Image (cartoon, rainbow, N blue to C red):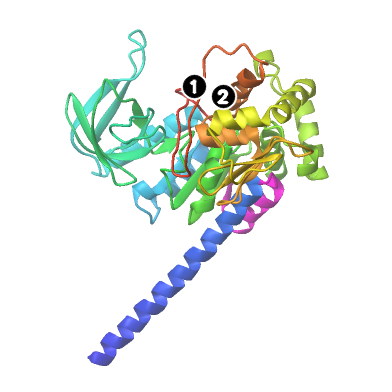
Amino acid sequence: MTDKINDSNNFNNIHNSKTDIENSKANSLNHNVAVKLINCDIADGIVLLSDHNSLRADNTLKESINQLINDWKNSKFEPQDRLIIAGHKEAENINQNIRNYMKENGDLKGPEYSILISGAESKKYANYMAGDRIIFQTNDKDLQIQNSEFATLVSIDESKFVAKTDTGNEVSFDLNKISFKHGYATTVCNPQTAVKKDVYVLHNNGVGIESSNISMIGNAEQVRLYYNMQATKNVANLIEQLSTAKTDSINSKEENNDVQANEVRQYQSAQNYRKNDYYSNSEEDLQKLRDAIAYRADTIACDLLGEPNKRLSRYGKIRWGDHGKIQVTTEGKYAGKWYDFTTGQKCDLLSLVQRERVCSFFEAKEYLKTIVGMSNVRQQYPRHARTNDSQQYTQQPENASLG
């Protein structure tokens, strides 16, 4: 009997070790993918996903969504460990479908309450029950919740909801004071409050992977990227679209290989990319903004990150945080570039704005234009203060989306 117990223990130890090794390999793969995407090596990142069966192609968007939802249903991970990243409309669709499944499966408990989420004329409602996944859309210091932070509803009544955040904080909040929505799928997430094991990315109509979401891939044990061949013909076209999204972030040409740069130029020319003057991406406009960002890199970084660490800073390279974790180059050829020593992330200041403010590319672009004096933006952006590595600030305009 003792021998059988020992054999069983040995088997469990072997199984656990094997699982640890597999998880380590998965984490290493996803970290490498994230690093490739952050460093604008789009082609290499996509090839890595494809080589490990993490790239899914379907004929239509509907088929992609159905495949994603089916994979989500069959996930071995708990719901709070899963994350779906999609465009705004697609996220709404996925949220509704998964919630219906959760309700039918008995995972949602107690009474169901409908909350008005749009104007009185349209009268659009969202339904909630205990067990529903939500994502907060406001910051609240008293409740210690952040914008884009995930939680699970614990109990609800007509005036008060109680939720447990994914960081373990249980909060009770007034429905009229705290903004939130269903959180099975989202457009933008806060990597500081949402470390997920199982990540699903839905790509459609040229929507790229935002910088604020890339770190989610690096921390995951399992990642899948879905695209449909109506919007994206093949893997080469997928690389073109994602490369275009990264080039829109004003990366210098030397930071992209010649193949990707040519793909981007061909794709932008063929699609007559974004004609709207308000979101103009002409080479002339990009060059003007690129020059302005490089010239005022120190001003932009201070507005975004607060007071720098003067002890660790030197001429042309300014550091932020108690340990100088973030460095921004303000002089020379690479003025306007940043590097995070703790994560290895690096890119241009526009991507840093997206990461720190948890906002979309266009919101980050307009934020920068206000600082360099190139835009008559309709809204004001508050200055944030940062005095140490642990402080986060995630305020963003509502309804920010990847698209």
Q: Residue at x 26, y 31 (%)?
A: 128
Q: Position of residue 105 (x, y in %)?
A: 27, 44
In the rendered view, tell whether residue 379 sits above or below residue 338.
above
Q: Position of residue 258 (x, y in %)?
A: 83, 43
Which of discs 1 and 2 lies nearer the camera? The answer is 1
Any part of residue 231 in sight: no
Chain-order first, disc 1 or disc 2: 2
Residue type at tag 1: Pro
Q: Nearer the viewer, residue 384 or 237?
A: 384
Please give the name of the residue rendered at 67% of the width and 43% of the height, measured from the top-left corner.
314
Q: Secondary structure at mark 2?
A: helix
Locate residue 287 relative to residue 10 in the image: left or right: right
Residue 177: where, in percent of width, then height? 28, 22
Taking the magenta stretch, the answer to whether it contains residue 50 is yes
Foreground of the two, 109 or 62:
109
Q: Is residue 373 above or below residue 390?
A: above
Residue 19 seen from this side: yes
Residue at label 1? 382
Quarter-of-image position of residue 169? top left
Asked if residue 88 lies left or right of residue 123, the reply is: right
Q: Quadrant of residue 144?
A: top left
Residue stretch in magenta:
39-61
According to the image, label 2 marks what residue? 363
**Badge 2 amino acid:** Glu
At a point 54% along the width and 52% down the height, the residue shown is 218
Viewer-nearest residue: 398 or 245: 398
